[in-house]
Image (cartoon, rainbow, N blue to C red):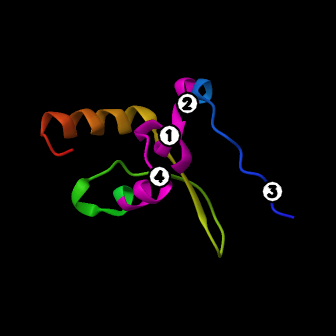
Amino acid sequence: MKMPRLRLSEDALDGAEYLTTDGLAKLFMVTRQSISKLTNDKERNFPKPFPLWKTDKREKHVWSKKEVIEWLEKQRSEKVT
């Protein structure tokens, strides 16, 4: 039986200091696939995540919401986005 995905509420995102891939997708209003492309693009210099755990099949990371917002504002000032 497949476990249902937890939905991230707007309130949870507002008060969060750290964001998962789902949280980043909700913050930027894009898909998780778009977030994956962004975080793996070395030229974009996206903030580094904090590793939570790693297994043989997957890794779980979180990003500092403060660092992500600072990066986004820098992109805007440089007219990259």
Say which residue label 2 marks. 13
Give the position of the N terminus as an image quadrant: bottom right
Choose the circle earlier in sequence order: 1 or 3: 3
Query: Looking at the image, which residue is at 37% across and 39% down?
Result: 68
Say if mark 1 contacts mark 4, CB within 8 Å: no
Query: Looking at the image, which residue is at 28% across and 39% down?
Result: 71
Amino acid under disc 1: Lys
Amino acid under disc 3: Met
Choose the circle earlier in sequence order: 2 or 4: 2
Q: Is residue 73 above or below residue 24?
A: above
Say which residue label 3 marks. 3
- Locate residue 42 relative to residue 39 in the image: left or right: left
At label 1, counting other C-alpha atoms closer than 10 Å, the crowd grade (few under 14, some 14-19, many 20 or more) is some
Q: Position of residue 77 (x, y in %)?
A: 14, 33
Would residue 20 be visible to someone looking at this image?
Answer: no
Of helix, strand and loop, which one carries label 4?
loop
Say if mark 2 contacts mark 1, CB within 8 Å: yes
Amino acid under disc 4: Thr
What is the distance, in whole Å, between disc 1 and disc 4 at their CAs?
8 Å
Q: Quadrant of residue 67?
A: top left
Front one among 16 and 3: 3
Q: Is residue 52 above or below residue 28?
A: below
What is the distance, in whole Å, between disc 2 and disc 4 at their CAs?
16 Å
Q: Position of residue 10 (x, y in %)?
A: 58, 27
Say which residue label 4 marks. 31
Which residues lie in the magenta part?
13-37
Magenta segment: does it hold 25?
yes
Choose the circle earlier in sequence order: 4 or 3: 3
Q: Main secondary structure of the magenta part?
A: helix
Say which residue label 1 marks. 26
Magenta segment: does it hold 40?
no
Say if mark 4 contacts mark 3, CB within 8 Å: no
